Amino acid sequence: MVLVFRVRGAGAGVFVKERGVRFRFGAVLLAIALLGTGCAAKGDGNSVAARAAATDKLTIGVGFDQPGLGRKITDTWFEGFDVDVATYVAGELGVAAENIVWKEAKAPDREAMIQDGRVDLVVATYSITEARKQRVGFAGPYFLAGQGLLVSQGTTNITGPESLDGKKLCSVKNSTSAQKVKERYAKGAQLVEYFRYSECVNALLVRNVDAVTTDDVILAGFATQHPELLKLVGKPFSEERYGVGLRREDADGKAKVNAAIEKMISSGAWRRSIEKHIGPSGYPVPAPPAITER
Ligand code: GLU
């Protein structure tokens, strides 16, 4: 051994030593990785509440173009009921409003934004569905809406989803609204899909489409911006249960967000926010929903 060591030179010994060090270093890395997996499995390491406590910051996805719900006014000024819910939840997780980083959560992007960690939470008229639950988790619901139709003031031949035959109907990709219309009503309607509802409303204003469909509460907000040009028609034809989107495995985060929603409702802040932001559209304040996503 000693001879080999000497003949081959110090390099051989160093090599063995290095390998030994590498082996030990590798073992430490493996142990850290296993520990990490253990934490994630328990939910602690992956909890939005733990991230908020550790970083004092939350990144939250909201709509940027939805009057009354989520709207970007300036780089630092966001407003609407969804923004208030998000701000309240963040506060309950110990994050001050000024430490929230707001990101636009367009309907087609919401699941991916949560899954790849671009946002910690999504509060963006985000309906709880079984299909979405395969990819993300939901707390809530914190609001109940229903699907509706928005048309030009002068339109008389569209009165509900059954009168859409031969009409151009606008909605947003990956929304429950577009899917419902495709499944139930679009046989005779031509579905036009954009990325945002404001794009649909602009198309309606210039008469490129005959109607816009999505949740009544969203449409009511747009109608208020152009009361002389736009109106809602028909009765709500679905139930949309708005949830706070978060990572699928985050049971701890879900429980804490649910507790925050319940406190927002019981403290009166929930109702005050709806009266302030949604009330001006004439949309009636609904009864607060019971939390179902435990
Ligand atoms: N709430 C429905 C959904 O989550 C429609 C509105 C929206 O796309 O945000 O699909």
Image: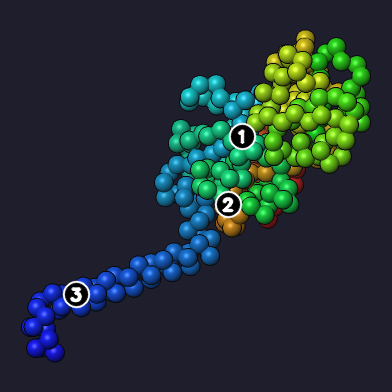
Q: Is residue 133 above or below residue 1?
A: above
> Marks 2 and 3, how far apart in space?
45 Å
Answer with the quarter of the image where residue 183 lies: top right
Front: mark 2 or 3 = 3
**Residue 238: x and y, percent?**
83, 38
For residue 19, above or below residue 149: below
State which tag comes first along the sequence, 1 or 3: 3
Q: In the picture provided, is 19 more to the left or to the right than 105?
A: left
Q: Amino acid at mark 3?
A: Phe
Give the image location of residue 14, x and y in percent: 15, 75
- Give how far apart the Cα atoms at labels 1 and 3 are: 55 Å
Q: Position of residue 41 (x, y in %)?
A: 53, 65
The label nearer to you, 1 versus 3, is 3
Nearer to the camera, 101 or 13: 13
Q: Residues within 10 Å of mark 1 (few under 14, many from 20)?
A: many
Query: Which of the marked residues, 1 or 2, is nearer the chain's N terminus?
Result: 1
Q: Residue at position x 48%, y 67% from top?
A: 38
Question: Can residue 16 be seen at all in this image of the molecule?
Answer: yes
Q: In the figure, 245 relative to 125: above or below?
A: below
Residue type for callout 2: Arg
* Residue with the mark numbered 3: 15
Q: Which residue is mark 1?
A: 106
Q: Going 70% across and 15% down the picture, which residue do you hit?
A: 225
- Mark sitting on residue 247: 2
Q: Secondary structure at mark 2?
A: loop
At label 1, the amino acid type is Lys
Secondary structure at numbered mark 1:
loop
Residue drawn at the location 71% of the way across and 38% of the way down: 175
Q: Is mark 2 within 8 Å of ligand 1?
A: no
Q: Is the C-beta separation of discs 1 and 3 under 8 Å?
A: no
Q: In the image, residue 86 lies at what x, y percent?
A: 58, 37
